[in-house]
Image: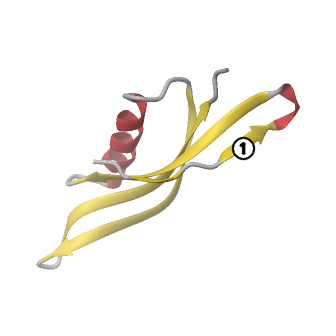
Amino acid sequence: MCKLLENPIINQGGNGMVVKVIELVGTSSHNWTDAVDNAVMEASRSIDDILGVEVTNFTANIDNGHIAEYKADVKVAFKVNH
């Protein structure tokens, strides 16, 4: 599961490439790595040319003293094609 939070557009240096960055929250019932993977996999279903990912935060939901859901806040960068 992923949730789109925002979508700023940034200019990437002097080479003229424009990169868009979106923020997502990936979730997993297993671990934080899977939460990141789930966010990137979901983004790649509708976005081409993903260049990288930055993990900005890890959180979790707790149930009966145990982690029930792992969450990863990620920024996914991709090339804007003209």
Q: Is residue 49 left or right of residue 58?
A: right
Q: Looking at this view, is 4 or 35 the one in front?
A: 4
Q: Which residue is mark 1?
A: 10
Q: Give the total of numbered labels.
A: 1
Q: Residue furthest front?
A: 82
Three-letter amino acid code of the residue under disc 1: Ile
| Position of residue 5 measured from the top left corner of the image (x, y, whole percent) | 46, 56
Q: Which residue shows up at 38% across the image and 44% down it?
A: 39
**Which image quadrant for residue 73?**
bottom left
Label 1's element?
strand
Residue at the extreme left: 64
Q: Classify residue 70 as left or right of residue 81.
A: left
Q: Quadrant of the C terminus?
A: top right
Residue 73, above or below 62: above
Residue closer to the observer: 72 or 12: 12
Q: Residue at x 57, y 36 (%)?
A: 52
Q: Tell me if residue 59 comes above or below residue 4 in the rendering.
A: below
Residue sticking out furthest to the top: 82
Q: Is residue 13 left or right of residue 58?
A: right
Which colour assignment does the render follow?
Answer: secondary structure
Q: Residues within 10 Å of mark 1 (few under 14, many from 20)?
A: few
Residue 16 in the image: x percent, y percent?
82, 27
Front residue of 38/79: it is 79
Q: Where residue 27 sits in the image (x, y, percent)?
A: 29, 53
The structure residue drawn at horizontal position 37% and vertical position 67%, both measured from the top left corner, is 59
Q: Position of residue 9 (x, y in %)?
A: 67, 44
Residue farthest along the right direction in this orientation: 14
Q: Residue at x 33, y 42 (%)?
A: 38
